[in-house]
Amino acid sequence: MQIQLRPILAVEDFEKAMGSARLSESDQELIEYIRYIGVFSQPSIIRDLRIKSKPPVLSTLCEICRKIGAQVPEHFTAIRLWSKSISAHDVHWDGDLICSTAQNIDGIPLTPEAGTTPYETLVVHKELFTGLG
């Protein structure tokens, strides 16, 4: 299996795009939380941020990513192509702009479908992680 390299956007360009995306305060809070915590699941976000479960927070995350992605269209197109190339179902996930499904040491996704966790576990991309700084 060949590893598909993820397109990487410089953090400065990401933050500029985020600033231009006209995100709501709650959208910004969600992105900042994800960037700080690093590893998360939908239930952990709902619990930690005390938000409603509907609409699903991962759907909201995709909407936010589309707003940010519109500010960096070439990169967002590259992310969508990469996302589709690594998908078991041959579809892209817009949340891959910020984070992707975590994998265990054996390279198996941490998802219910893989039988490894009760909820999909996601991890923010390294260059966007802010939890240590």
Image (tube, rainbow, N blue to C red):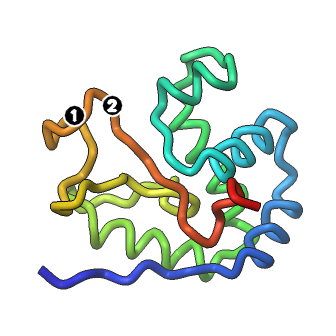
Please tell me which residue is depicted at 14% across the width and 36% down the height of the picture: 115
- The CA span between labels 2 and 1 is 6 Å
Which residue is disc 2 drawn over? Answer: 119
Question: Is 37 above or below relative to 13?
Answer: above
**Which amino acid, mark 1?**
Pro
Local packing at callout 2 (Cα closer than 10 Å; few below 14, some 14-19, many 20+) is some
Q: 96 left or right of 31?
A: left
Closest to the observer, 61 or 74: 61
Closest to the observer, 42 or 62: 42
**Which amino acid, mark 2?**
Tyr
Assess whether mark 1 and mark 2 are in contact (beta carbons under 8 angstroms): yes
Please tell me which residue is depicted at 24% across the width and 62% down the height of the picture: 90
Please tell me which residue is depicted at 25% across the width and 34% down the height of the picture: 117
Question: Is 37 above or below relative to 19?
Answer: above
Question: Is 16 above or below relative to 68?
Answer: below
N-term-proximal mark, 2 vs 1: 1
Q: Quadrant of residue 114?
A: top left
- Secondary element type, mark 1: loop
Q: Quadrant of the C terminus?
A: bottom right
Residue 58 bears which disc, if any? none
Please tell me which residue is depicted at 63% across the width and 56% down the height of the picture: 66
Residue 58 screen position, x and y as percent: 51, 37
Closest to the observer, 34 or 53: 34
Q: Quadrant of the N terminus?
A: bottom left
Which residue is disc 1 drawn over? Answer: 112
- Image mark count: 2
Residue 88 screen position, x and y as percent: 19, 58
Residue 49 screen position, x and y as percent: 69, 25
Local packing at callout 1 (Cα closer than 10 Å; few below 14, some 14-19, many 20+) is few
Q: Quadrant of residue 51?
A: top right
- Secondary element type, mark 2: loop
Residue 92 screen position, x and y as percent: 38, 60
